Image: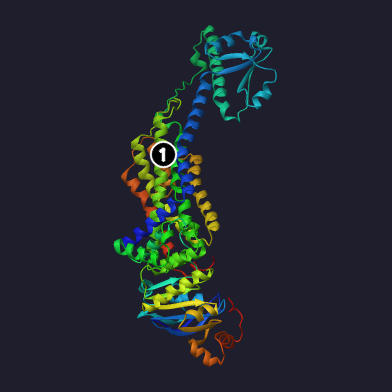
Amino acid sequence: MTARRIFAIARKEIVDSARDRRTLLVALLTAVAAGPIFLILIFNLIARQADSARELKLPAIGLSNAPALEAFLVRNQVTLSEAPADYEAKIRAGEINVVLVVDADFAKDVAEGRQGRVRLVSDRSRDRAQPSIRQAESLLRAYNRLWGGQRLLLRGISPAVGDPLAIEDFDLATPQQSGAIVLFLVAFYALLGSVMGGMAVSLDTTAGERERQSLEPLLMTPARPIELAVGKWIAVSVFNLLVVSVMLCGFYLTLAYAPLPAVGIPFLFSEREVGRFLTVLLPVALMIPAILLYVGTRARTYKEAQANVSVLMFVVSLAPVVQLFLQQREPPWLVLVPVSGQYTLLRQALRGEAIGVVQLGLSYVVPAVLIVLALGGVARLLSRESILSGK
Amino acid sequence: MIRVEGLTKAFGKKREVNAVSDVSFIAPDGEITGLLGPNGAGKTTLLRMLSTLVTPDSGTAKIGNLDILRDRFAVREHIGVLSDARGLYLRLTARENIRYYGALHGLSGAALDARVDALIETLGLTPLANRRTQGFSQGERMKVAIARALVHDPSTIMLDEPTNGLDIMSVRALRDQLRALRSAGRCLLFSSHVMQEVAALCDRIVILSAGKVIAHGTAQELLSWSGGATLEDAFVTLLGSGEGLAA
């Protein structure tokens, strides 16, 4: 194995792939665009939800039956209005979040010592309506407590008698820990970038080489199969790291300079996080090209290779999603599992936590082993006779 | 010098397809040896074995003093092969294609440049040298593939159907180059299914049919063995039919 020949192979593959302008541009543009587009969308979503919660608009029916409730809501800065007659249809269509209906007999019931009935009409399947629904509910409960407390006071009883539990909301999340969906997306796309960057190049240099009939003459040169494998791996890794770097720059620049709405998530993505991201992503960014090369070399045609690679992509993109939905504390050994481990560490970096050297070291172990195995596999496939047949 | 001794190769799950069976011949230096046979006679498999890509089931061959089984990579340093598959890198220029193979053969720097320039000159590729091979005609691509195979100045040169798809002018130019290599003392093995090609160029002829050597000698010897008046008659007599030999 000579370094000079490996270098010559890597150089040729880099030049060759860099001239495939369209493929390269698509990969880079996707990487550049992903950060800004997703961050702006997500931040706007969060900002809108916060706004709709802050300024509750509450269309109501029969509010004149409960003037004290009306006064309470106005004092709490709720914008009240008369609900349209077809409010149910409008709620289903998503035009109105929630409607308050006060029973026609409210005043009479209350006067005669019965409970006054109010109804909150909403569609809980719609995410955007949730903050408004929650706020309307909590306002009604607050009014309920206030009223009940006043009645007890009139009878000389402390309101604490009917309200024995004092619930204090004490959120341990630092500001960076909120916005879980943002954390997820940033980590997820960074991971996906380290998988996508080398995809086209690795298939082109393996299955493509075979399909273009340039593999046989290449194998007749004194270049050893392992040199070809390592040289090609270096070339694909260069492209992969390029895409990852571009993507991280996109995140960084967007968060630093884009006019994102202030949503109360002092989101940490400074130079320090860019550096941490790179050190965390490095093993995957090097491992995936080796695996892609193996898949590409195994396949008889470019198409077959593409089909196999999409399975690989599916598995890789599934891991973080599963972790997101399991919502469990990750077991410590998870750091050993490629992709899942990286995802865990990335979120840790985003939360502003330091990443331990031991943890980082452990996350390198399995990728390193897989790189060696995959490249060995590529070399073994290249020295087989059957690589020539089955065009 | 190529010395082939009893090379045999069968394919298929039960080794039921005998591609090459018990082939022996000698191709001396300073001569062009023609490997003539109809399609499917085993020419490509034989050349793949000689270029160490395919391992024979039995028998062996020597390229110079090197054994194709024991000295696989050393053999590759001394042979230049224009194989059946001759794809170029279409996004690289002609010069870059040739240089890459030079680098794989361990050449570098001024020596590599000089060698590449010389080949470009000899093969008449000068006006094309710095263009990407994407838009090249079949003849132009063939020239680049030949230059690529010769970049390390191999002592043994094997060409699998090199005239396929070439026009008359390119074929003549190719013949001149092969003769020049012969004069320089190289050992050339030239496979073709076109009798006229082989007759026009080769000093010795090995006729393959169904994986077996059925005749082996100079054109003169083949004529006298078969008793035919022309080479064409001789081939037909030796093969038992003229099938597959037409251009």
Residue A326 in the image: x percent, y percent? 50, 41
- State whether residue A3 is above or below residue B246: above
Residue that lies at the very extreme toward the front in this rendered image: B169
Front-most of residues A214 and A325: A214
As displayed, is residue B6 above or below residue A155? below
The percent coordinates of residue A278 (x first, y second) are: 36, 43
* Residue matched to label 1: A347
Q: Is residue B240 above or below residue A23?
A: below
Q: Dot 1 surroundings within 10 Å: few (below 14), some, or many (20 or more)?
A: many
Q: Position of residue A59 (x, y in %)?
A: 62, 17
Q: Is residue A345 above or below residue A387?
A: above
Toward the viewer: B34 or A244? B34
Q: Who is closer to the viewer here, B184 or A23?
A: B184
Residue A243, image quadrant: top left
Residue A1 visible from this viewpoint: no
Q: Residue furthest left?
A: B110
Q: Amino acid at mark 1?
A: Arg
Q: Determine which quarter of the picture holds residue B230.
A: bottom right
Please count the marks in the image: 1
Dot 1 falls on a residue whose secondary structure is: helix
Q: Quadrant of the N terminus of chain B?
A: bottom left
Residue A20 vs residue B186: left or right? right
**Image quarter of the C terminus of chain B:** bottom right
